[in-house]
């Protein structure tokens, strides 16, 4: 088995979400999958569980394209971030990692890579016993939750992720806010982060091209994530 790495591409919000979900739905093997991707322009995604009536009133989405993700979490701005997707198939040993432990491990790994590149960070503590736990964050980077990656002082959120767990596996969609880093070598960061993910799943990297069936296969998902019915009511077109 290997950690499958797909090539970097820049696309629209619906296309990016469709690519992630297509790969997740096609997970019939036991190889974990990782990809890093970009955005044609500044866009916004929001979580599967958020109410459109609330999201539609938020200032951050004004005059910007917006897409509902297949994973949870809150509103996230894209275009000046480092976005990635990670799939742990049901047939792989890493599927048994508890969700909070997986979340913490991913963000700890990002923090270690950033530290090696000269940037100190911290993890947001989880609520103590008896403390009120927040529900779905409204704006992801303004409402950090336990085990998010924060600045050294703990005042600014740097990285977050959202997950979806089904019988097929675990889908992780994550983002790193690049605005707080000056002169960060993104190529070195990406390589080192993937090395950390290799260690997490205990597999060697295998870079692969997109399959010939990719464009045709993901087409229904592009239609889904582009549709008003999905964005507003989580219904398939």
Image (spheres, rainbow, N blue to C red):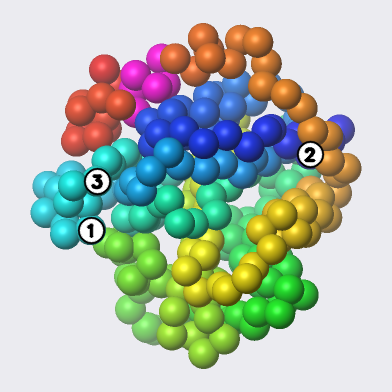
Using the numbered discs, state the Cα–Cα distance from disc 1 to disc 3 in whole angstroms: 8 Å
Q: Identify the disc placed on residue 60.
A: 1
Q: Is residue 5 left or right of residue 48?
A: right
Q: Quadrant of residue 88?
A: top right
Pick the residue in front: 146 or 16.
16
User: Which residue is under mark 3?
Assistant: 64
Using the numbered discs, state the Cα–Cα distance from disc 2 to disc 1 in whole angstroms: 36 Å
Q: Which residues make up the magenta segment?
A: 220-225
Q: Does the magenta portion include 118?
A: no
At mark 3, the secondary structure is loop
Q: Name the residue at the front extreme.
A: 183
The answer to whether any part of residue 139 appears in the image is: yes
**Contact check, label 1 and label 3, Cβ < 8 Å:** yes
Pick the residue in front: 2 or 100.
2
Q: Does the magenta portion include 222?
A: yes
Q: Is residue 126 left or right of residue 169?
A: left
Where residue 24 sits: x, y (%)?
A: 57, 30
Q: Quadrant of residue 207?
A: top right
Where residue 174 sits: x, y (%)?
A: 53, 53
Q: Residue at x 16, y 57 (%)?
A: 58
Q: Residues within 10 Å of mark 2 (few under 14, many from 20)?
A: many
Name the magenta segment's main secondary structure: helix
The answer to whether any part of residue 45 appears in the image is: no
User: Which residue is under mark 2?
Assistant: 3
At mark 2, the secondary structure is strand
At mark 1, the secondary structure is helix
């Amino acid at each position: 088995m290997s950690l499958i790495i797909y090539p970097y591409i820049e696309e629209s919000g619906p296309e990016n979400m469709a690519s992630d979900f297509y790969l997740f739905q096609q997970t019939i093997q036991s190889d974990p999958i990782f990809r890093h991707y970009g955005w044609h322009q500044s866009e916004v995604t929001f979580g599967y569980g958020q109410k459109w009536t609330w999201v539609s009133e938020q200032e951050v989405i004004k005059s910007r394209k917006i897409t509902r993700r297949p994973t949870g979490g809150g509103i996230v701005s894209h275009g000046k971030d480092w976005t990635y997707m990670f799939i742990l198939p049901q047939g792989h040993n890493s599927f048994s990692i508890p969700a909070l432990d997986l979340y913490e491990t991913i963000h700890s790994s990002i923090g270690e890579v950033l530290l090696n590149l000269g940037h100190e960070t911290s993890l947001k503590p989880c609520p103590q016993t008896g403390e009120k736990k927040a529900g779905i964050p409204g704006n992801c980077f303004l409402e950090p939750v336990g085990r998010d990656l924060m600045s050294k002082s703990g005042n600014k959120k740097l990285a977050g992720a959202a997950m979806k767990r089904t019988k097929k596996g675990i889908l992780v969609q994550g983002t790193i806010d690049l605005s707080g880093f000056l002169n960060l070598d993104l190529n070195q960061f990406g390589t080192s982060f993937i090395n950390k993910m290799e260690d997490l799943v205990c597999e060697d990297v295998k870079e692969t091209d997109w399959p010939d069936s990719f464009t045709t296969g993901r087409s229904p998902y592009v239609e889904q994530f582009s549709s008003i019915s999905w964005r507003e009511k989580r219904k398939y077109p």
